[in-house]
Image: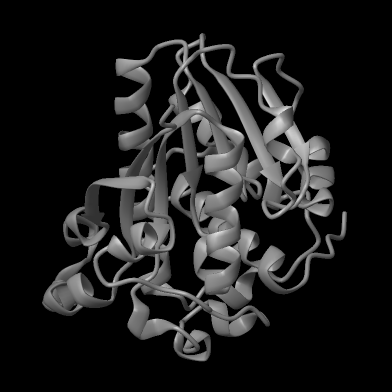
Amino acid sequence: MSIKLNGVMETLLITLYVRAKDAMSSNPVIHDKKAIEIIQKIDYDFQKFESGEMSYYGVLARAKIMDKEAKKFITENPDCVIVSVGCGLDTRFSRVDNGKIKWYNLDFPEVIEQREIFFEKNEREINIAKSALDDTWTQDVKTEGKKLLIISEGMLMYLKENEISQLLQILTNGFDSFEAQFDLLYKGLVNKAKMHDTLKKTSAQFNWGVKDGSEVVALCSSLKQKGLINFTDELKHMLPGAKKLLVPMMYIFNNRLGIYTYQKIG
């Protein structure tokens, strides 16, 4: 089947392709066999991403760390609620599920339409076909007093600063408390998508980035920063041969995971 996703939405196909390529490798990191199944059903030129070697290792390192941090939250809160903001065609629910959590996938209607073609229904996995900037989506999430985790992978860098502020306001207005795990771009890469080894094959652009994650708190002072993990912590173990020489530079330019907490006062 053909798939028509433009701009930022097309970027989800990059991560999908990486996970499928990894699953077909002799030493897979994520073991995402579902990704193989999906790309085999889509009529799309995935080969244009083949030359993106650094993206390949970067996407896998990011996914592994974000899986680990989600699992950590689930271990501490076995019956928690998780919202994947800008979920794309991700399979994280199946990778971290403990059989008890409730999971919400949030993305544009066009993306959710594709998800519903490729993924079987699960009573604990619910799709919300809305923009993350539509302030009504939080009403669709039923926490029922349980701990809430907000995850965003590969999305915030495509928003503008005022849109980041809007999203943070939607989160803090919509929920009494949560932990948020945000994939964050280094600020030096803003407006430099055409230098990126795979993103340059799309029409998407990097619009927002950070240095140390404090920029998120600066936009929403009711958040507290709990941690910051550079994805190079995992990437350095994956890079082959001479590419390991790039590790010091990658610590500067690579994405990082900002971890935040929110608790409504009063």
Residue at image point 57% right, 74% down = 160
Residue 232, above or below 227: below
Q: Is residue 87 above or below residue 253?
A: above
Q: Give the image location of residue 186, x and y in percent.
A: 33, 74
- 174 left or right of 121? left
Q: Nearer the viewer, residue 27 or 97?
A: 97
Q: Is residue 107 left or right of residue 183?
A: right
Q: Position of residue 258 (x, y in %)?
A: 32, 52
Q: Identify the residue shown where x is 62% and y is 66%.
A: 11
Residue ranking furthest to the right: 1
Q: Give x and y (percent) for residue 212.
A: 24, 65
Residue at 36% x, 79% y is: 187
Locate residue 161 relative to residue 256 in the image: left or right. right
**Quadrant (top left/top right/bottom left/bottom right) for the C terminus:** top left
Q: Position of residue 27 (x, y in %)?
A: 33, 45
User: Which quadrant would residue 48 be assigned to in this image?
Assistant: bottom right
Nearer to us in this view, 189 or 136: 136
Residue depicted at 42% across the width and 41% down the height: 180
State which quadrant residue 136 falls in. top right
The answer to whether residue 227 is left or right of residue 31 is left
Work out whether residue 7 or residue 167 is closer to the camera in this orientation and state it. 167
Asked if residue 75 can be seen in this view, the reply is yes
User: Is residue 28 at all visible to an observer of this figure?
Assistant: no
- The single residue placed furthest to the front in the displayed view is 266
* Colouring used for the render: one colour
- Quadrant of image for the N terminus: bottom right
